[in-house]
Image (tube, helix red, strand yellow):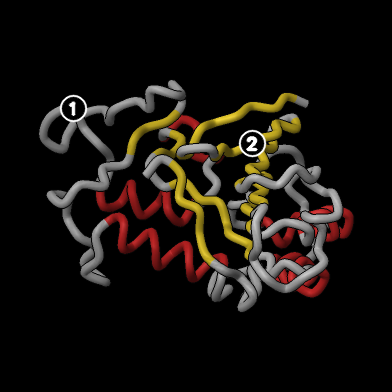
């Protein structure tokens, strides 16, 4: 485990403990351990130190042991951000989130990680987390192109297997809804993860919101 300090103002810093792929930020001047007496789930307030848990690596099943652990922190960002997650896990996101909240004494909020700016290209389309989103981008030609709207879309600088999505204002809207890429994607994501309007996915009314990466 590594510890880093970042200054955030006169006499203050944020301590970040890196545990594998997980970063936990502790704000405030207290000297207690991250899970010591002053940071464990003992009150219903949001007093410092406030803990954030980003958990988007590994199997992303978020089973009972994770739920108990996550209930100790104030903000939890979970992955499992793909259509069909519930069928693969055998239980719903609502079960995960409601269990975390029921065990929490620190008013834990659970946010869903999501990324919309890149998708696997046509060769690797089956790898995409959201086939519905990919099909919509492809049908509306919401790909980012070097010039005009024809030819091969721009390759994601982070992956040669992905293309970038054009989130700008000058792309055509969806004729059925009148929505552009960001608006359409926002509705899709909410319908999928919170309202459960897609086959094989249940509603998650305990869900708190979204962590949008690569904005």
Residue 167: x and y, percent? 26, 47
Residue at image coords 72%, 56%: 73
Q: Is residue 4 visible?
A: yes
Direction from residue 204 to residue 20 in the image, left or right: right
Residue at image coords 58%, 39%: 14
Residue 62: x and y, percent? 78, 54
Mark 2 residue crowding within 10 angstroms, few (<14) / some (14–19) / many (20+): some
Say whether disc 2 or disc 1 marks the residue closer to the N-terminus: 2
Q: Say above or below: 204 vs 140.
A: below
Residue at numbered disc 1:
146
Residue 56: x and y, percent? 65, 43
The quarter of the picture where residue 198 lies is bottom right
Q: Nearer the viewer, mark 2 or mark 1?
A: 2
Direction from residue 92 to residue 15 in the image, left or right: left
Furthest residue in direction front, as rendered: 11
State the separation of the CA atoms marked 2 and 1: 42 Å
- Front residue of this view, candidates 76 and 72: 72
Q: Say above or below: 10 vs 88.
A: above
Residue at numbered disc 2:
15
In the picture, the quarter occupied by the C terminus is top left
- Front residue of this view, candidates 132 and 35: 35
Instruction: Kindly state the secondary structure of the residue where label 1 is placed.
Output: loop
Residue 201: x and y, percent? 64, 68
Residue at image coords 64%, 66%: 46
- Front residue of this view, candidates 1 and 122: 1
In the picture, the quarter occupied by the N terminus is top right
Residue at image coords 71%, 61%: 86
């Amino acid at each position: 485990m590594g510890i880093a300090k970042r200054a955030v103002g006169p006499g203050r810093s944020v301590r970040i403990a890196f545990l594998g792929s997980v970063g936990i930020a502790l704000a405030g001047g207290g000297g207690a351990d991250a899970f010591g007496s002053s940071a464990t789930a003992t009150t219903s307030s949001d007093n410092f130190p406030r803990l954030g848990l980003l958990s988007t690596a590994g199997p992303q099943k978020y089973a009972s042991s994770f739920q108990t652990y996550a209930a100790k922190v104030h903000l939890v960002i979970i992955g499992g951000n793909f259509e069909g997650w519930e069928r693969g896990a055998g239980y719903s996101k609502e079960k995960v989130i409601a269990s975390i909240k029921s065990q929490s004494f620190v008013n834990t909020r659970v946010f869903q990680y999501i990324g919309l700016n890149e998708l696997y290209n046509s060769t690797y389309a089956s790898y995409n987390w959201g086939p519905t989103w990919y099909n919509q981008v492809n049908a509306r030609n919401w790909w980012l192109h070097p010039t005009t709207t024809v030819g091969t879309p721009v390759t994601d600088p982070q992956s040669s297997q992905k293309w970038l999505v054009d989130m700008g204002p000058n792309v055509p809207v969806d004729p059925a809804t009148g929505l552009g890429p960001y608006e359409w994607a926002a509705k899709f994501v909410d319908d999928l993860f919170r309202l459960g309007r897609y086959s094989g996915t249940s509603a998650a009314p305990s869900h708190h919101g979204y962590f949008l990466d690569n904005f």
